[in-house]
Image (cartoon, helix red, strand yellow):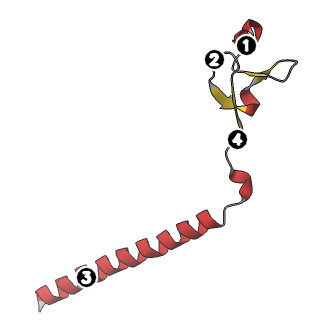
Amino acid sequence: MKYLLIVLVVAVVFWAMASRRRSSDGRDAQAKRSRPRGDQAAPMLACVHCGVHLPREDAVMDAAGRAYCSREHRLAGPR
């Protein structure tokens, strides 16, 4: 009788863990589907001098509107 009680307790613990994992997976999938559109990747630009891609916010622009990765490459000009 004692062993039957131990097996029952272990089974209840495993069942509780499995049901908790299933319910949290469902919430994560739902949260990913309902994510706002503003969470998209930043627009990327390629440096005209070396070709390195970087976010538009980090780019150094010249008067003609060309993107560079650094001030030095802007001064060096396009290749």
Where residue 78 is drawn, which disc sits there?
A: 1
Q: Is residue 45 left or right of residue 33?
A: right
Q: Amino acid at mark 1?
A: Pro
Q: Amino acid at mark 3?
A: Ala
Q: Amino acid at mark 2?
A: Cys
Is the Cβ of the residue at disc 1 closer than 8 Å to that at disc 3?
Answer: no
Residue 73 percent coordinates (x, y)? 70, 12
Residue toward you, 29 or 61: 61
Whole-number angstrom distance, CA of label 2 to CA of label 4: 20 Å
Camera-near label (2 vs 3) is: 2
Identify which residue is drawn at 59% across, 70% down.
30
The answer to which of marks 2 and 4 sits earlier in the sequence is 4
How many dots with numbers? 4
Identify which residue is drawn at 75% across, 13% down.
74
Question: 10 Å neighbourhood of mark 2: few (<14), some, or many (≥20)?
Answer: few
Whole-number angstrom distance, CA of label 1 to CA of label 3: 69 Å
Label 3, on which residue? 11
Label 2, on which residue? 50
Question: 10 Å neighbourhood of mark 3: few (<14), some, or many (≥20)?
Answer: few
Where residue 13 is drawn, which disc sits there?
A: none
Identify which residue is drawn at 71% across, 9% down.
72
Whole-number angstrom distance, CA of label 4 to CA of label 1: 24 Å
The answer to which of marks 1 and 3 sits earlier in the sequence is 3
Is the Cβ of the residue at disc 2 closer than 8 Å to that at disc 4?
Answer: no
The answer to which of marks 2 and 3 sits earlier in the sequence is 3
Whole-number angstrom distance, CA of label 3 to CA of label 4: 48 Å
Q: Label 1, secondary structure: give it.
A: loop
The answer to which of marks 4 and 1 sits earlier in the sequence is 4
Is the Cβ of the residue at disc 1 closer than 8 Å to that at disc 2?
Answer: no
Q: Is residue 64 left or right of residue 31?
A: right
Identify which residue is drawn at 70% across, 41% down.
42
The answer to which of marks 1 and 2 sits earlier in the sequence is 2
